Image (tube, rainbow, N blue to C red):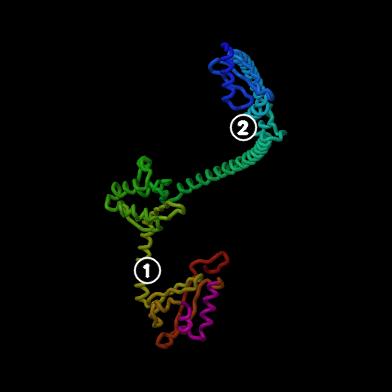
Amino acid sequence: MTENDGELVHILNLIKETTRGSGVITDGINNQILAYTRLKGPEWYFISVLPKSYLESTALKVARFMILLGIFLLFFETLLLYMVLRGQVMMPLNNFIDASKTLARTDFSDSKKSDRSLPVERDDEVGVLARSFDDMSEQLSDYSFNLEQKIAERTSELEQKQKELTVQKRTIEETLENLEQGIIIVDDDFKILSYNNSFLEVFGIAKEKMREMSRFEEITEYYVKEIEKKPELLNENLERAKSRLPYSNEFCLPGGQIIEGRQIPIEGGGFVRTYTDVTAHRQELEEVKDINRQLNQAFSAGKLGTWNMDILNGTYVVNEENAKLFGYSQEDMNKGTEIWKRIIHPEDFVTVNSGLSDCIKGKQDSYHVEFRAYTSTGDLKWIESRGNVIERNKDGKAL
């Protein structure tokens, strides 16, 4: 047996180990590839032996070719994909970007005039998006136009209101300055909003000093400490102001003037305070009281009864001597007209009413009548009554 016969025996052993009729096996010892098949009949094997080096060289050539072909196809596919994406995706996206930037500038009209129109004619998702974007642009354009109109109308209204408020403010300021009352206006935070010169004059505060104070607490503290010289009244005055309730009071200034103060709450917060010098009025009232005391003393000495009639309200007011004249109290006599029906004699009642009515209507300048009257004890007296109308209207009727 030659050396080649030993190699053949080796190959046959490899084939038999496979237990298959045909196949391809590797001979690792001889570094070769064996392809075999069993022939029917003589039970021979047809074997093809190929060195591994030959197959590797051929496979390498094929692999190189396939790699180069794959690289070329990959480049071609990439180029083709780029062109498709550029035409179908990138350009529509750029158009969307341009249109979005135009909308961001709130220039709705130019979004439709762009050189790159949106692909609204496409039937795919991009076309749906383009049509939706186009509809949105139209709606935004309509909304913007309507909003601009509303803003213009509102601006015009606000300008008109501002003019009216300016006129009202000027009118209020002029009115405040022309009022004899001292007035100060304070907001809900106790900040001084406005005041007039009469306010400064009432309390003797210099304008320069007033400009230094912006809050009501400051001016209150300044007044009680520096002008009134009664710092213990500070908390009481501040608590009264913080209550924000309406009130009125009278107080005397160090100079002797009598001031009537009123606090009027403002709807929404804050308040208005008014200060009126009522010194002369109070002096007049005292003089009137003195005159009334003197008259009452004279009436009492002369046993004369007086009465006043309020035509509008239909009420009577009598003095004490008048009540004594008929034996009643002043309270009973001032309750109303019913008591006079008991006092006046029935036969004279018409005469009394007629004379009083003619005087009220202006048919007579004065009232003068004599009548019989019953006292509370039933005694009958003759009474002479005289009267004059204090004020008449242009038609001569009593007011």
Position of 173 relative to 70 (above/below): below
Q: Residue at x 52, y 46 (%)?
A: 168
Given residues 79 and 244, the one toward you in this image is 79
Given residues 79 and 346, the one toward you in this image is 79
Q: Residue at x 35, y 69 (%)?
A: 294
The residue indicated by pointer 2 is 100
Please state if 115 lies on the left or on the right of 261 as rendered: right
Q: Amino acid at mark 1?
A: Asn
The numbered mark, 1 or 2, whose residue comes first in the sequence reads 2
Q: Is residue 184 visible?
A: no
Position of 136 relative to 52 (above/below): below
State the image quarter where residue 260 is shown.
bottom left
Give the number of the mark in front: 1 or 2.
2
Counting every numbered tag in the picture gives 2
State the extent of the magenta-drawn residues as a range: 336-360
Q: How many residues crowd around disc 1 within 10 Å: few (fewer than 14), some, or many (20 or more)?
A: few
Q: Is residue 342 magenta?
A: yes
Q: Amino acid at mark 2?
A: Ser
**Residue at disc 1, secondary structure:** helix
Q: CA distance from mark 1 to mark 2?
A: 92 Å
Please state if 219 lies on the left or on the right of 100 as rendered: left
Q: Residue at x 59, y 18 (%)?
A: 33
Please state if 110 lies on the left or on the right of 210 as rendered: right
Dominant secondary structure of the residues highlighted in magenta in the image: helix
State the image quarter where residue 212 is shown.
top left
Q: Is residue 249 magenta?
A: no
Outermost residue on the front side: it is 1
Q: Position of residue 219 (x, y in %)?
A: 35, 46
Q: Position of residue 6 (x, y in %)?
A: 56, 15
Give the numbered dot on residue 292.
Answer: 1
